[in-house]
Amino acid sequence: MAYFNPINWLLGLFSLDIGIDLGTANTLVYVQGKGIVINEPSWVTIDKRSRRPLAIGMAAKEMVGRTPKNVIAVRPLRDGVISEFDITQIMLEYFIGRVHEQSVVPLPKPRVVIGIPAGVTEVEKRAVYDAAMAAGARQALLLEEPIAAALGAGLPISDVRGSMVVDIGGGTTEVAVMSMSGVVASRSLRVAGDEMDQDIIQYLRNKYNLLIGHGIAERIKMTIGSAYPLEKEKTMEVRGRNLVTGLPETVEISSVEIREALAHSVQVIVDTVRDALDEIPPEIIDDLMDLGVCLAGGGALLQGLDHRLTDDLRLRTWVAEDPLTCVARGAGMIYDDFENLSRYLVGLERRSA
Ligand code: ADP
Ligand code: MG
């Protein structure tokens, strides 16, 4: 039995326990007892000469595509892993600092659980750990994202029955089948939300000679994008630059066209999910026929994607409640029931001296 340590007990009373989803597209912070307190794009703008950050999060994303020559906009994570260490640290420090600012009394450093993509290397895990510690955490623990997403979505992953989660983010789509607290089969695919934005840019360029930016492409996807015919198809006016005349132009586009633009990426996602299903034993297929397939991440919000997967896989597919926050909420839940849930945490190898 653990002995009682009054200092730790006191620290525990006042310190924050937080879950962090360090996503390619969005970073979210969940504070125990408060819920999601930070939900901002994973963007940082930097002054090229001084290398100092100018804006972080939403303010930085608004600058994307509009920056003057001396400013660069960076997404410090790529394919779910840290590609720019210093900038990730700055971003984490800022978000963790903001959580602390919201408190009236000065608090001790927080304990954090952070989601990491399944199957990352030791070096990549270490980078996330180091960034969190450098950003002011008292303790940093790591949790695989599919497990975090499944916990956040309320899936019974400790059950003997199998469950399946498909997390579609900005950079990657992660598919995982779990049972008895472990991952039975998984797939990771570098086709997700960003690729869909790219598809829309390419489509409008080919069909209308219209050049649009990433932000507008994303807005089109969220407004009229779909993966299954809509009950009532929609249209939208899109402004961009005509590549032939060089002049501004407005074009009316329809949801049918955008579905066509997204068709290939959607197909790749469907194929990957099917591929993962191919690998699992029939008992688990049987379980999934009851429980269905759970969609999480922002990409889960693409209209009709659940319908499309239900049709193609012949398994009921459903969108988790608040799919964008599943990973952060799942990571934050570890501290709710540390005794039972800490077994999901991923260990780090001891650093060799
Ligand atoms: P990450 O885990 O990589 O940070 P998120 O889970 O936050 O990613 O999801 C971000 C992605 O979800 C972006 O590509 C965004 O465009 C997409 N997304 C968000 N809302 C919608 C929507 N309503 N329809 C389609 N895609 C969406
Ligand atoms: Mg994610």
Image (cartoon, helix red, strand yellow):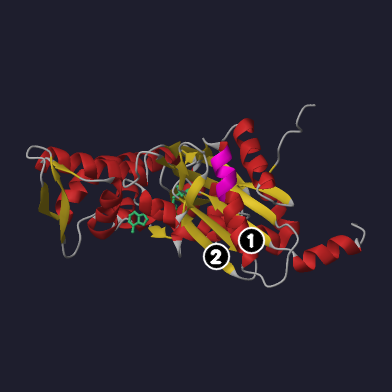
Image coordinates of residue 199 in percent, x first then y, are: 25, 41
The label number, if any, that marks residue 333 in the structure image: 1
Residue at the limit of the structure toward the right, as seen here: 3
The label number, if any, that marks residue 44 in the structure image: none
Please check the rendered image and state whether residue 88 is part of the magenta-colored stretch, yes or no: yes
Q: Please tell me in which quadrant of the rendered image residue 335 appears.
A: bottom right
Magenta stretch, main secondary structure class: helix
Q: What stretch is highlighted in magenta?
A: 86-91
Mark 1 neighbour density, 10 Å: few (under 14) some (14–19) many (20 or more): many
* Residue sitting at x 40%, y 59%: 318
Residue at the limit of the structure toward the left, as seen here: 245
Check disc 1 and give the amino acid type. Met
Please check the rendered image and state whether residue 173 is part of the magenta-colored stretch, yes or no: no
Residue in front for this viewpoint, 27 or 349:
27
Where disc 1 sits, the SS reads: helix
2 sits left or right of 302 in the view: right
